[in-house]
């Protein structure tokens, strides 16, 4: 990797600021000051910026407990976005952090963020059928006919292809756990509408083997464990 690129990736500096820092003699590589911005680093080089060692982190994988009112986007000029909830040091270093599986603004719960495009594809690609489990508060008690329809697959408004069979667990008369393996637009809300009920509140509990950490307050995040990352296959 080029020296200026390495510095822009591992420190809060932009590429332009990294170049300036190199020219200003603030960057040391394996004990020598380097002044050439485009020089390629040898493997396992020790790079210091103003005496502080810079470490190249691997890909990043986070879970966030998304509160209501936050938009699942990486840019929005009008509304607060999920990335606003993360510390600036993190979003500056992990610039290609993106959301793996969006939620509506009023949906709460498990949101995954990563820099790893291949991994997020495994979460979101319909071909992978990665299961997502939602807690769904309903406006009226759930009927057997609604459960049967959800489990068989329903036809959504303006979408002729029926949904894949879902799993339903009734927790309370007006609270169900619904597991789906697709990610169509507003899918859960539209499924319940098609099956004769209405979603009052929606919360994502898990994605594949990753369960929202109950220690995370709304708005909090943590890094995923190796085991959680590997559970998305
Ligand atoms: N289905 C919805 O309708 N909304 C979400 O946010 C997620 C799934």
Image (cartoon, rainbow, N blue to C red):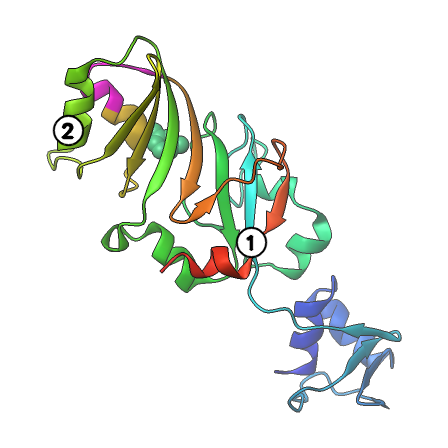
Residue 224: which disc?
1
Q: Nearer the viewer, mark 1 or mark 2?
A: 1
Q: Which residue is mark 2?
A: 154
Per the image, is 194 magenta?
A: yes
Side of 74 where 208 appears, left or right:
left
Side of 29 where 99 appears, left or right:
left
- Residue drawn at point x = 52 percent, y = 50 percent: 113
**Neighbours of disc 1 within 10 Å: few (<14), some (14-19), many (20+):** some
**Residue 37 image position (x, y, % from top left):** 72, 83
- Mark 2 CB lies closer than 8 A to ligand 1: no
> Relative to 154, does residue 102 appear above or below in the rendering?
below
SS class, disc 1: loop
> Relative to 96, does residue 26 appear above or below in the rendering?
below
Residue 196: which disc?
none
Res 152 quadrant in image:
top left
**Residue 51 image position (x, y, % from top left):** 89, 75
Q: Which residues are magenta?
A: 192-199
Of pointers 1 and 2, the one earlier in the residue sequence: 2
Side of 167 where 135 appears, left or right:
right
Q: Quadrant of the N terminus?
A: bottom right
SS class, disc 2: loop
């Amino acid at each position: 990797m080029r020296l200026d690129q390495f510095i822009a990736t591992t420190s809060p500096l932009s590429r332009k600021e990294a170049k300036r820092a190199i020219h200003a003699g603030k960057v040391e590589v394996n004990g020598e000051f380097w002044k050439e911005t485009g020089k390629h680093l040898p493997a396992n080089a020790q790079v210091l910026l103003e005496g502080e060692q810079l470490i190249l982190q691997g890909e990043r994988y986070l879970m966030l407990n998304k509160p209501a009112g936050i938009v699942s986007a990486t840019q929005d000029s009008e509304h607060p976005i999920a990335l606003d909830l993360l510390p600036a040091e993190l979003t500056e270093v992990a610039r290609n952090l993106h959301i793996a599986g969006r939620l509506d603004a009023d949906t709460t719960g498990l949101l995954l963020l990563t820099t790893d495009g291949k991994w997020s594809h495994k979460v979101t690609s319909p071909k992978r059928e990665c299961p997502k489990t939602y807690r769904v508060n309903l406006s009226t008690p759930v009927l057997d006919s609604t459960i049967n329809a959800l489990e068989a697959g329903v036809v959504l408004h303006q979408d002729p292809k029926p949904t894949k069979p879902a799993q339903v667990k009734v927790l309370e008369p007006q609270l169900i756990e619904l597991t789906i393996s697709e990610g169509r637009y507003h899918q859960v809300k539209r499924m319940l509408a098609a099956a004769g009920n209405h979603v009052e509140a929606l919360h994502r509990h898990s994605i594949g083997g990753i369960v929202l950490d109950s220690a995370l307050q709304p708005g909090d995040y943590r890094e995923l464990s190796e085991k959680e990352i590997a559970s998305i296959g």
